[in-house]
Image: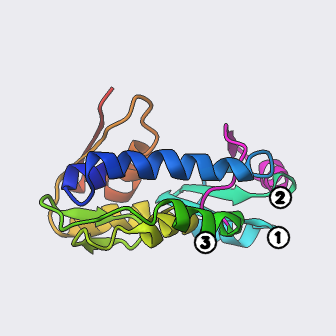
Amino acid sequence: AAAVVSGALSLEDGARVVALRSRAITALAGRGGMVSVPLPVEQVRDLLPDGVSVAAVNGPSSVVVAGDPDGLEEILGRVERARRIPVDYASHSAQVEEIREEILRVLEGVSPRPATVPFFSTVDAEWLCGEELDAGYWFRNLRQTVRFETAVRALAEEEFGAFVEVSAHPVLTVGMDEALGDAAVVSGTL
């Protein structure tokens, strides 16, 4: 959505990215999952069993891990207040490597262009021009750790003072509040 709003992708290409990546990830269904862990990322990394990795760092004590079901059960058993996210695949984990070629193939025709609205990437935690948002970027976007907290802090350092999570079920506002404190206004849409 942000890539389309920025002008870096046409509406058609944005829809292609969403639909075709979603279809590709079904190949991983049933073999993994994700768990929200209310601890700092450094502590989470020390707890990770084989087959589980950090999927997203949303705030100072808001981390998501992804990987195989047995490893996730181990995390759930060891971390109080950890909770399962209702998905049966492991985005942002090594499992995504299995669908790399498929994603690159189906998104080969995506035609990114210069953004007309600034675009800050949670993959690279920096401003992008827009032309980088090719098939390879969208694979990395699904494979790499989401650097949401880093991105929010970087924007706050550039004096952005209001952050709105556009979602029917805001889950990132807590991490943003923790990361930014009184430095910015944080709100959900509903």
Relative to 111, is 124 on the left or the right?
right
Residue 31 among those drawn in magenta: no
Q: Which residue is mark 3?
A: 42
Query: Is the C-beta separation of discs 1 and 2 under 8 Å?
Result: yes
Could you tell me which residue is drawn at 46 percent across and 72 percent down? 136
Per the image, label 2 sits on a secondary structure element best described as helix
**Residue 71 tag number:** 2
Query: Is the C-beta separation of discs 2 and 3 under 8 Å?
Result: no
Q: How is the image coloured?
A: rainbow
Please give the range of residues in magenta.
71-93
Relative to 188, is 142 on the left or the right?
right
Could you tell me which residue is drawn at 71 percent across and 66 percent down? 98
Of the residues shown, which amino acid type is indicated by label 2? Gly
Q: Which residue is mark 1?
A: 50
Numbered disc in front, either 3 or 1: 1
- Front-most of residues 18 and 171: 18
Per the image, label 3 sits on a secondary structure element best described as helix
Quarter of the image with the C terminus in it: top left
Residue 82 among those drawn in magenta: yes
Numbered disc in front, either 2 or 3: 2
First in sequence: mark 3 vs mark 1: 3
Circle 1 packing at 10 Å, graded few (<14), some (14-19), many (20+), is few
